[in-house]
Image (spheres, rainbow, N blue to C red):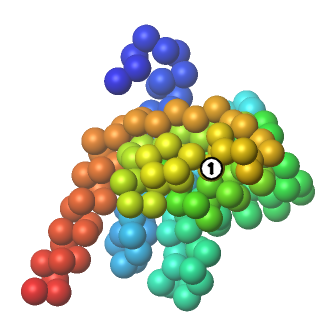
Amino acid sequence: MFPEYPEYLTHQKWMNRALELAQIAGDAGEVPVGAVIIDAVDNVIAEGENRKERDKDPTAHAEIIAIRSAAKTLQSWRLDQCTLYVTLEPCPMCAGAIVHARLQTLVYGVDDTKTGAIRTVINIPNSPASNHHLQVVGGILESACRQKLQTWFAAKRHKHK
């Protein structure tokens, strides 16, 4: 999609890792969403995958789990030198957490036409209510991210027939 940009290969690498985490979530019966947080020198500092069902926790989205883990790793709630990679556009809860964590960059795979809170349904990071603005890159490995979700939901619907 953006092969002329040198950071595109980096974005692909980390989105592939987020897709691996999404697969783990999907295999466990969760909506297949995965997240990875990278520091300023391209090291993984946190990972997460959806765990709502397993943890019986409505806030156990991949992004929230990764943000909590990154804050513990860095011993700071400020993640201002970090990039979050996530397979699906964040929801309002996760978008709020991303803003409050002061993440430098958000890279996501596929737009969420129902609850996307970065640019699809609403835009929390650029709203007047946001006290932090971050760089956002959407559409990285979009087809693979969309396919993972569509396949999982189709299998779930088929199982219920």
Query: Residue 21 location in percent, x, y?
Result: 47, 59
Name the foreground residue: 147 vs 137.
137
Q: At 50% from the left edge and 43% from the top edge, which residue is drawn?
A: 119
Q: Nearer the viewer, residue 94 or 80?
A: 94
Residue 47: x %, y % from top left: 61, 57
Mark 1 closeness class: few <14, some 14–19, many ≥20 residues within 10 Å: many
The answer to whether residue 2 shows anywhere in this view is yes
x 49%, y 15%: residue: 5
Residue at 25% across / 69% down in the picture? Answer: 153
Residue 49 is left or right of residue 22, and the answer is: right
In percent of width and height, residue 56 lies at 55, 88
Secondary structure found at label 1: loop
Type of amino acid at the residue the image marks with label 1: Ile
Rendered image quadrant of residue 104: top right
- Residue 114 or residue 159, whichever sits in front: 114
Give the residue at the far right of this rendering: 75
Residue 43 seen: no
Query: Where, by quadrant of the figure, is residue 1 drawn?
Result: top left
Write the residue at 17% across / 87% down. Answer: 160
| Residue at the disc numbered 1 | 124
Decide: is 111 above or below 65: above
Q: Residue furthest left?
A: 161
- Seen in the picture, residue 28 relative to 22 is either above or below; the reply is below
Residue found at the far top of this picture: 4
The quadrant of the rendering that contains the C terminus is bottom left
Q: Position of residue 137 (x, y in %)?
A: 52, 33
Query: How many numbered callouts?
Result: 1
